[in-house]
Image (spheres, rainbow, N blue to C red):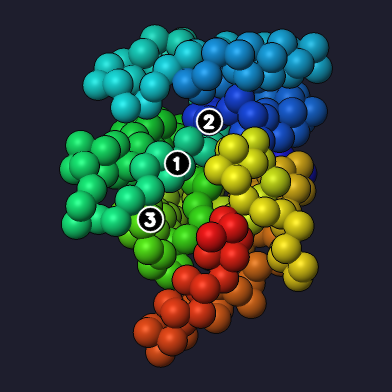
């Protein structure tokens, strides 16, 4: 059971307005942990903040684009006066899908900055404070996309692979200081973002997870780092780690085309 006595009285959720992020917020509020919710879209952020506040915890919300150069400064402005014992980084997304060699490099850089640079900045800041206190937890939301390259999302897949390896190293560095580190690897999850992307959840045999379930799984296994594969996707991750990369890529590409209806 996750609780404030183990981790601390406040949690920061980057990407905490909808989908899995909102599920994290509600479940942490149920555990009596106060929240700082960060998201780019004001509507869902306001709605989730109000709903979570009604559960009886303190909530601070920050409408913020993590690509803003002043993002960390803004986050510190609403967190420096409280003890943040949990960081949930759920903000990574595939914000630009395109064939790499004809892509807009500024847009590509945005994918890197959201999924890698922003994650590093928040982890560096809050992780150092947790190490000093001798307790805390860092949960980085990853993706099965990081196990295998995909056409038109090659940079996103690579960024997610980076996130998993980063979590492994960070786990080794912080475990002796009482700080839990976990990358929670998600597969297909029924979130508003995936619905907006046009994913077809009705494909027979498709393993579709629900946001509440994967958030609950992640929080339950936070002490079991460095990596936890959610939603019963262990076998899929294992298959994507096989040695015959060309055959794996071809098969995965065909499946991805069916998923997005091409």
Query: Where does label 1 land, which residue?
Result: 92
- Lower sequence index among marks 1 and 3: 1
Q: Position of residue 55 (x, y in %)?
A: 80, 17
| Foreground pick, 108 / 39 | 108
Which of label 3 and label 2 is nearer to you? Answer: 3
SS at circle 2? loop
Picture layout, residue 67 above or below residue 54: below
Q: Mark 2, residues whose alpha carbon is within 10 Å: few (<14), some, or many (≥20)? A: many
Up/down of 157 relative to 220, above or below = below
Identify the residue under disc 3.
153
Numbered tag placed on residue 15 in the rendering: 2
Residue 258 sits in which quadrant?
Answer: bottom right
Circles 2 and 1: CB distance less than 8 Å? yes
Name the residue at 76% across, 57% down: 202
Q: CA distance from mark 3 to mark 2?
A: 20 Å
- Per the model, the C-alpha gap separating discs 2 and 1 is 8 Å
């Amino acid at each position: 059971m996750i609780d404030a006595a183990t981790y601390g009285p406040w949690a920061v959720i980057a990407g905490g307005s909808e989908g899995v992020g909102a599920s994290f917020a509600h479940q942490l509020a149920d555990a009596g942990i106060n929240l700082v919710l960060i998201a780019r879209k004001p509507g869902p952020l306001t709605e989730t903040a109000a709903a979570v506040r009604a559960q009886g915890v303190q909530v601070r919300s920050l409408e913020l684009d993590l690509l803003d150069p002043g993002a960390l400064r803004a986050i510190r402005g609403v967190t420096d006066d409280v003890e943040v014992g949990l960081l949930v980084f759920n903000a990574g997304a595939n914000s630009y899908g395109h064939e790499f060699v004809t892509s807009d490099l500024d847009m590509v850089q945005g994918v890197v900055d959201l999924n890698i640079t922003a994650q590093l900045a928040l982890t560096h800041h809050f992780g150092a404070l947790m190490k000093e206190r001798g307790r805390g937890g860092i949960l980085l939301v990853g993706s099965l996309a990081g196990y295998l390259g995909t056409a038109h999302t090659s940079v996103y897949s690579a960024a997610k692979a980076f996130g998993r390896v980063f979590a492994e190293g960070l786990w080794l560095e912080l475990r002796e200081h009482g700080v839990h580190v976990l990358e929670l690897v998600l597969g297909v999850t029924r979130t508003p973002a995936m619905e907006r992307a046009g994913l077809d959840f009705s494909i027979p045999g498709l393993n579709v997870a629900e946001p509440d379930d994967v958030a609950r799984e992640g929080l339950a296994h936070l002490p079991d780092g460095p990596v936890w594969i959610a939603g019963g996707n262990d076998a899929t991750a294992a298959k994507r780690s096989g040695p015959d990369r060309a055959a794996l890529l071809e098969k995965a590409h065909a499946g991805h085309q069916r998923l997005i209806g091409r």
